[in-house]
C-alpha cells in the first residue's frame, strides 16, 4: 500500500500556517514537489531522507514568516491611501492636503457654532492658518501641475469661478424674468422647480465649459484625465462643499451641516483607497447623494423653530428642498469626466517651439 | 554599468539559480529544484518551502510567470509551469555580467597560489 510519508504529512499540516492565498496558489504544487523529493531521497537511503527532513523542517518557519510578511506588506500597500492613484501611496502631508478643503468646511461650521463663545478667537486663528495652507496647496498644486493630492483644493479654487458664474447667471435669469411674475421668484412651486431644471442645465454647461477650457490650457491635466478620468471627478467634487453653507439665515442647522461635511469627507476618503475608477466615482456620487439630502432633512426639521416660520409656513418644504435642487447638476458634473476619454487625440493647445 | 539604489541586483544565489534554470525553458517546481542541484553541483540544495517562497516572490515581481503546461500532463503532475519573463531574462543577464566582472577583477588582483 502506498502510504503518505510522514515528511509529506507534516508539510500538509504545516501548510495551514501559510496565508490562504499562498496555500491556494502553491499548496498543491509544493506537496507534489515534496512528495517527489521524498521518493528520491528514500531511494538513496535513510540518511538522505533524514537530511531532506532536516532541510525541509529547518527552512519551513522562516519561509512561512517571509510569506506572511510579504502578504501583509502587499495588503498594507493596497489599502494605503492613494495606493491606486498617481503619486500614491500618499505621505501624511499629502493626505492632509487632500482633506484640507473638508477641514476648512468643518472649521467654518465650528466658527458658526462658537459665535459668541469664548473660543471664537482660537477658532479664527486656526482658520487663518488653514487658509494659509490652502493658499500654499494652490500654489504648489499649480506649480507641480495638478498633482492628485492637490486636486480637491484646486477644485475649491475652480469652484470660486464656476459657482460664481452659476450664481450670476441664476440672478440674471431671475431678474430678467421677474417682471413676468412680479417678484424675484414665481409664487408657483412647479414653476420654481422648472426654473431649477433650467439652472441645473446652466450649471452643467458652465462646468463642462470650464473643464474643456482647463483641459485645453493644461496638457498635464489633459494627460492626467486621459490616464484616469476619475481624477477629474475628484477635482469637481469640492463643488458640493458650498451647499453645506447655504441657508445661513437658519439657526440650529450646524449639526446637519457637520454630518453633511463628514459624509463628503468620507466620500473623499473612499475615493483615495478604492482601486477601480468606477468604484471611486460611485463613492463620490453616493457621498454627494447622501450629504445634500441630510441638509434638506435638517432644514425641514429646524424650520418650525425659526423666527420667520409662522409667516412663511407653507414654504417649509420649498426651503428644505433648496440643497437638493442642484443635486442633478452636481451628479452630472461628477460624471462629466467620463467623457474626457472621448476627447480627440489632437485636443488641447499645442505649444509651438521655434525651429532649431 | 552602475546600478541605482533601486536596482534588484545582486540577487541571492537561490534566485540566480532559479532564473538560470528557467532560462533553458519552462519547468514545474520540482524540475527547477532538481535542476538547481545539478547546476550548482549540489552546492545549493533548496527546501521546497524556500523554493516556493522564492517562486511566489519572483512571480509577484514580474520576473517569472506561471503558464499552463503545453501538453496534457500525467495525473498528479502540476498543471502549470514557470517561465522567465523578459524582465527576468534582463535580471539574469545583469547578474551574470556582475558576477563576470567580479570574477575578472578577482582573477586580475588575486595572487596566484604558490606551488
Image: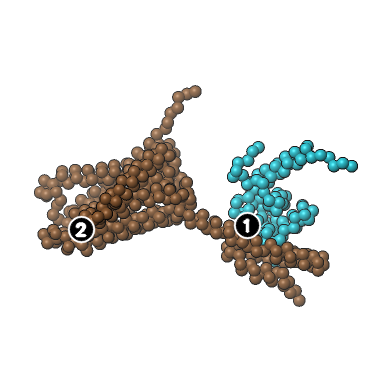
Chain colours: A brown, B cyan
**Would residue A154 appear left or right of A113 to someone viewing this image?**
right
> Residue A140 at x, y = what percent?
40, 40
Kindly give the residue lying farthest to the right in the view shown.
Answer: B115
> Residue A120 at x, y = what percent?
26, 52
Crowd around label 2: few <14 · some 14–19 · many ≥20 (10 Å)? some
**Would residue A186 appear left or right of A38 to someone viewing this image?**
left
Kindly give the residue lying farthest to the front in the view shown.
Answer: A118
Q: Residue at x 66, y 52 (%)?
A: B83
Q: Which residue is mark 1?
A: B56
Q: Residue at x 17, y 63 (%)?
A: A304
Q: Is residue A337 visible?
A: no
Please tell me in which quadrant of the rendered image residue B57 appears.
Answer: bottom right
Give the label, 1 or 2, closer to the camera: 2
Please state which of residues A94 and B63 is positioned toward the viewer in this rendering: A94
Q: Which mark is residue A251?
A: 2
Q: Residue at x 36, y 55 (%)?
A: A265
Please tell me in which quadrant of the rendered image residue A325 appears.
Answer: bottom left
Please state which of residues A112 and A326 is positioned toward the viewer in this rendering: A112
> Residue A311 at x, y = what percent?
11, 59
Q: Residue at x 63, y 47 (%)?
A: B8
Q: CA distance from mark 1 to mark 2?
A: 61 Å
Determine the chain carrying the residue at label 1: B
Do circles 1 and 2 both sit on a common chain? no
User: Element under label 1?
Assistant: helix
Amino acid at each position: 500500500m502506498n502510504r503518505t510519508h510522514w515528511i509529506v504529512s507534516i508539510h500538509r499540516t504545516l501548510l495551514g500556517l501559510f496565508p490562504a492565498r499562498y496555500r491556494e496558489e502553491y499548496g498543491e504544487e509544493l506537496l507534489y514537489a515534496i512528495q517527489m523529493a521524498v521518493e528520491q531521497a528514500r531511494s538513496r537511503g535513510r540518511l538522505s531522507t533524514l537530511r531532506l527532513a532536516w532541510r525541509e523542517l529547518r527552512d519551513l518557519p522562516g519561509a512561512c514568516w517571509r510569506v506572511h510578511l510579504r502578504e501583509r506588506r502587499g495588503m498594507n500597500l493596497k489599502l494605503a491611501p492613494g495606493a491606486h492613484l498617481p503619486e500614491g501611496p500618499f505621505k501624511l502631508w499629502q493626505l492632509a492636503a487632500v482633506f484640507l478643503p473638508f477641514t476648512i468646511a468643518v472649521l467654518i461650521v465650528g466658527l458658526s457654532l462658537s459665535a459668541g463663545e469664548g473660543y471664537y478667537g482660537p477658532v479664527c486663528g486656526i482658520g487663518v492658518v488653514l487658509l494659509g495652507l490652502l493658499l500654499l496647496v494652490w500654489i504648489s498644486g499649480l506649480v507641480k501641475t495638478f498633482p492628485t493630492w492637490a486636486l480637491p483644493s484646486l477644485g475649491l479654487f475652480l469652484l470660486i469661478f464656476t459657482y460664481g458664474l452659476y450664481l450670476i447667471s441664476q440672478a440674471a435669469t431671475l431678474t430678467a424674468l421677474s417682471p413676468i411674475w412680479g417678484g424675484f421668484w414665481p409664487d408657483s412651486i412647479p414653476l420654481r422647480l422648472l426654473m431649477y431644471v433650467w439652472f441645473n442645465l446652466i450649471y452643467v454647461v458652465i462646468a463642462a465649459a470650464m473643464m474643456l477650457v482647463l483641459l485645453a490650457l493644461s496638457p498635464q491635466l489633459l494627460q492626467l484625465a486621459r490616464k484616469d478620468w476619475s481624477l477629474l471627478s475628484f477635482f469637481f467634487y469640492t463643488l458640493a462643499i458650498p451647499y453645506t453653507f447655504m441657508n445661513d439665515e437658519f439657526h440650529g442647522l450646524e449639526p446637519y451641516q457637520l454630518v453633511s461635511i463628514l459624509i463628503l469627507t468620507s466620500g473623499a476618503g473612499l475615493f483615495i483607497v478604492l482601486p477601480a475608477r468606477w468604484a471611486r466615482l460611485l463613492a463620490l456620487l453616493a457621498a454627494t447623494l447622501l450629504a445634500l439630502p441630510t441638509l434638506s432633512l435638517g432644514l425641514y426639521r429646524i424650520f418650525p423653530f425659526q423666527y420667520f416660520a409662522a409667516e412663511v409656513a407653507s414654504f417649509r418644504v420649498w426651503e428644505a428642498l433648496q440643497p437638493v435642487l442642484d443635486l442633478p447638476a452636481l451628479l452630472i458634473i461628477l460624471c462629466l469626466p467620463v467623457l474626457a476619454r472621448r476627447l480627440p487625440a489632437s485636443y488641447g493647445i499645442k505649444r509651438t517651439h521655434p525651429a532649431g | 554599468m552602475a546600478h541605482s539604489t533601486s536596482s534588484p541586483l545582486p540577487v541571492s544565489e537561490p534566485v540566480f539559480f532559479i532564473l538560470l534554470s528557467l532560462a533553458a525553458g519552462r519547468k514545474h517546481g520540482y524540475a527547477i529544484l532538481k535542476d538547481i542541484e545539478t547546476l550548482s553541483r549540489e552546492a545549493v540544495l533548496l527546501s521546497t518551502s524556500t523554493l516556493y517562497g522564492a517562486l511566489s516572490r519572483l512571480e509577484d515581481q514580474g520576473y517569472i510567470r506561471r503558464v499552463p503546461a503545453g501538453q496534457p500532463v500525467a495525473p498528479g503532475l502540476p498543471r502549470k509551469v514557470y517561465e522567465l519573463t523578459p524582465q527576468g531574462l534582463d535580471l539574469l543577464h545583469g547578474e551574470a555580467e556582475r558576477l563576470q566582472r567580479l570574477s575578472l577583477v578577482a582573477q586580475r588582483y588575486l595572487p596566484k597560489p604558490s606551488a
